[in-house]
Amino acid sequence: MTIAGRFEAALDDVHEPDLAGPELLPVRLSRACARMLRVDGAGLSLLDASQQRIPLGASSVEAEIAERLQFTVGAGPCMAAADTRQPVFAVEEDLRRRWPVFSDLLFGATRYRAVVALPLQPALTGFGALDLFFERADDVPELDVFEALAVGELVTSALSDAAVWSSWSAADGPDWLHGPAPLRRAAVWEAMGKLGVDLEIGAPAALALLRSRAYGSGQSVDDVAADLLSGRLRAADLTGAPDSAD
């Protein structure tokens, strides 16, 4: 059977009822990637036209955590692959050397000990990346890189086809940009805007404050953003300045 045929079969095997719907296509694709490539986890992310990094979906909760940790730190294999448009292969030693903060968080929160990040071709709304996670570094050499790159192209085609054959506006984007993971990350952009208004700072400074708070409190940036928008956290809490309401 061809690579395309095997990937289609793997995708057809992802038939959990709670994964139905066009907004969850990236989750189904991630699970199909993990099954076909025989890796321990997979995740899809996107760098859109405004340079915002958006998680699209992952094969498991653990793979979702790995993406959030990478975004919280602001550096890692997936970001390197998306930025350079080159594959990144990183076993435990490489992760510790190149991204020590990210690796400490990754090893503490997940079972993953190696990552292969592959850039994806543009899919209408930006450049994507496919993260493949391994619990054993010794399994990385067993990955068929040609097959993995071909699967990445099939993922891009599936996302593009889903967008082409559906109705959506440029402002809202395709349905697969409205799953749980993208919506969770959208709260970060909203929180950055709130901080910008409250503290009169730019977007980079706002994101830096969110990341600093997240790392210092053992949370993800997504969690800190949710706390800020819900009122559980105030802008002044991120700067250490007294709040005017106190």
Image (cartoon, grey):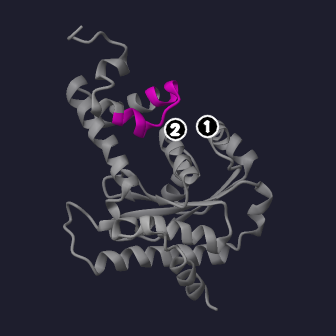
Residue 55 in the figure: left or right of residue 49: right
Residue at image mark 1: 105
Q: Would residue 134 appear left or right of 25 to someone viewing this image?
A: right
Give the residue at x 37% y 47%.
185
Q: Quadrant of residue 34?
A: bottom right
- Name the residue rendered at 44%, 26% in the picture: 213
Position of 239 with respect to 170 (left or right) is right
Q: Position of residue 88 (x, y in %)?
A: 62, 58
In front: label 1 or label 2: 1
Q: Which sits in the foreground, 217 or 104?
A: 217
209 or 176, which lies in front? 176
Name the amino acid type tagged 1: Leu
Tag 2: residue type? Val
Relative to 199, is 45 above or below? below
**Quadrant hosting residue 125:** bottom left
For the residues bearing labels 1 and 2, Cβ distance under 8 angstroms: yes
Q: Say which residue appears at 62% left-offset and 40% top-offset.
A: 109
Assess whether residue 135 is covered by the magenta stretch: no
Q: Position of residue 131 (x, y in %)?
A: 57, 59
Q: At which x and y percent is residue 64?
A: 51, 51
Is disc 2 placed on a helix, strand or loop? helix
Q: Which residues are magenta?
A: 213-226
Which residue extends farthest front?
17
Q: Is residue 174 visible?
A: yes
Quadrant into which the N terminus falls: bottom right
Choose the circle earlier in sequence order: 1 or 2.
2
Element type at mark 1: helix
- Residue 145 found in image quarter: bottom right
Q: Nearer the viewer, residue 58 or 154?
A: 58
